[in-house]
């Protein structure tokens, strides 16, 4: 059975798309920190996007505001460009590679199996963080969802696979998962290939794979895992578009703070992450209580005498 662990030593960030770029920015903040923070040199690869230079400038501004030392843009626009060693050369010394969203088939057609794609893999093997959002998340796996329909019921030929970068073996990654109701297509793919681990990532959420086998969840939503090792299906006889039999699949829905072992496919642990706004509110409440305690203690005493009393007590 294929091992779903990454083939390399770097950390993977599979982001489900629509990650927050203002205010909390939990997912992108974690990516920048993993890439080295102030020492980070991040390559933004917007090949999948249909947008122009503005998509580069958005991520350049966000990563810079989060403390990244340097951000470079690398955008092969054809397979021929991706075969040019000069285009791939800057990847030799980056600490992070970030692939934007867009059309994942463009990534597969332009990058996989090229000098540029090999340079991304090499960067990851030497320890660079490689991440992607939406289409950029799907291409991280060995098998990439090229396209497919929405819906909760798995159906025959509901989606189609293409080749990814192979940084996450034995797995397939889907994105915008809950928001676009992609449960059915992930189930259909696992039903057709039960050895694959299906990974569905919600928006503004990341499945972070580190240490070769450990998946952790960061962000606002959840990561859904479908383990089909003991699955029973009729995929080999079902007619096109017919509902598929899927029985015996193990389902794991992991919110932020969850850790999962990709080798044994078991939950390692979970801690409840406290939202930034809750932390701020708690700190504000503590400050109010401290001030209230001071005012109660000082009631009926002049501020000067009270401060003198406090200093004596501290002494």
Image: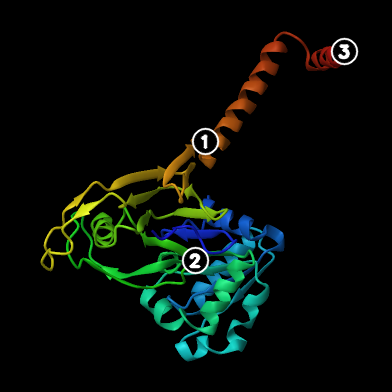
Name the N-terminal-most of marks 2 and 3: 2
Residue 30 location (% of width, % of height): 57, 53
Q: Which label sits on residue 18?
A: none
Q: Is residue 87 above or below residue 160?
A: below
Q: In which image quadrant can residue 155 be found?
A: bottom left
Q: Secondary structure at mark 3?
A: helix
Locate the N terminus by quadrant: bottom left
Residue 177 seen anywhere in this rendered image of the structure = yes
Q: Nearer the viewer, residue 110 or 53?
A: 110
According to the picture, the residue beneath numbered tag 3 turns out to be: 312
Locate the C terminus by quadrant: top right
| Real-space Cα separation, disc 2 to disc 3, in angstroms | 64 Å
User: Is residue 292 toward the left or the right of residue 156 in the image?
Assistant: right
According to the picture, the residue beneath numbered tag 2 turns out to be: 167
Name the N-terminal-most of marks 2 and 1: 2
**Residue mark closest to the camera, 2 vs 1:** 2
Q: Secondary structure at mark 2?
A: loop
Residue 173 location (% of width, % of height): 38, 61
Q: Number of callouts in the render?
A: 3
Residue 103 seen anywhere in this rendered image of the structure = no
User: Is residue 76 toward the left or the right of residue 237 in the image?
Assistant: right
Q: Quick one: label 1, few (<14), some, or many (20+) residues within 10 Å?
A: few
Q: Residue at x 31, y 54 (%)?
A: 179
According to the picture, the residue beneath numbered tag 1 turns out to be: 278
| Real-space Cα separation, disc 3 to disc 1, in angstroms | 36 Å
Q: Residue furthest front?
A: 1
Q: Residue at x 51, y 40 (%)?
A: 275
Q: Secondary structure at mark 1?
A: helix
Residue 131 location (% of width, % of height): 52, 64
Q: Residue furthest top?
A: 300
């Amino acid at each position: 059975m294929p091992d779903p662990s990454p083939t390399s030593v770097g950390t993977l960030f599979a982001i489900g798309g629509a990650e927050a770029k203002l205010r909390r920015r939990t997912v992108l903040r974690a990516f920048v920190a993993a890439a080295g923070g102030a020492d980070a040199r991040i390559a933004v690869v917007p090949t999948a996007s249909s947008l122009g230079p503005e998509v580069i400038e958005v991520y350049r501004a966000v990563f810079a505001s989060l403390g990244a030392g340097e951000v470079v843009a690398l955008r092969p626009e054809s397979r021929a460009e991706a075969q040019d060693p000069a285009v791939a050369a800057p990847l030799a010394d980056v600490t992070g590679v970030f692939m934007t969203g867009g059309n994942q088939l463009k990534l597969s057609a332009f990058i996989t199996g090229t000098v540029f794609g090999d340079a991304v893999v090499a960067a990851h093997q030497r320890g660079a963080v490689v991440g992607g959002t939406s289409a950029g998340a799907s291409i991280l796996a060995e098998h990439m969802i090229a396209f497919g329909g929405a819906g909760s019921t798995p159906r025959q030929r509901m989606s189609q696979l293409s080749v990814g970068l192979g940084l996450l073996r034995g797995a397939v990654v889907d994105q915008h998962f809950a928001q676009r109701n992609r449960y059915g297509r992930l189930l259909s793919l696992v039903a057709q290939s039960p050895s694959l681990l299906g990974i569905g990532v919600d928006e503004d959420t990341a499945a972070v794979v580190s240490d070769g086998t450990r998946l952790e969840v960061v962000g606002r939503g959840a990561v859904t895992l479908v383990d089909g090792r003991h699955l029973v299906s009729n995929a080999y006889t079902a007619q096109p578009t017919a509902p598929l039999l899927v029985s015996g699949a193990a389902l794991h829905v992991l919110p932020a703070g969850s850790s999962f072992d990709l080798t044994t496919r078991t939950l390692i642990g979970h801690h409840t992450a406290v939202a930034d706004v809750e932390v701020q509110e708690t700190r504000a409440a503590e400050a109010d209580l401290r001030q209230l305690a001071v005012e109660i203690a000082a009631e009926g005493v002049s501020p000067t005498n009270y401060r003198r009393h406090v200093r004596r007590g501290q002494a």
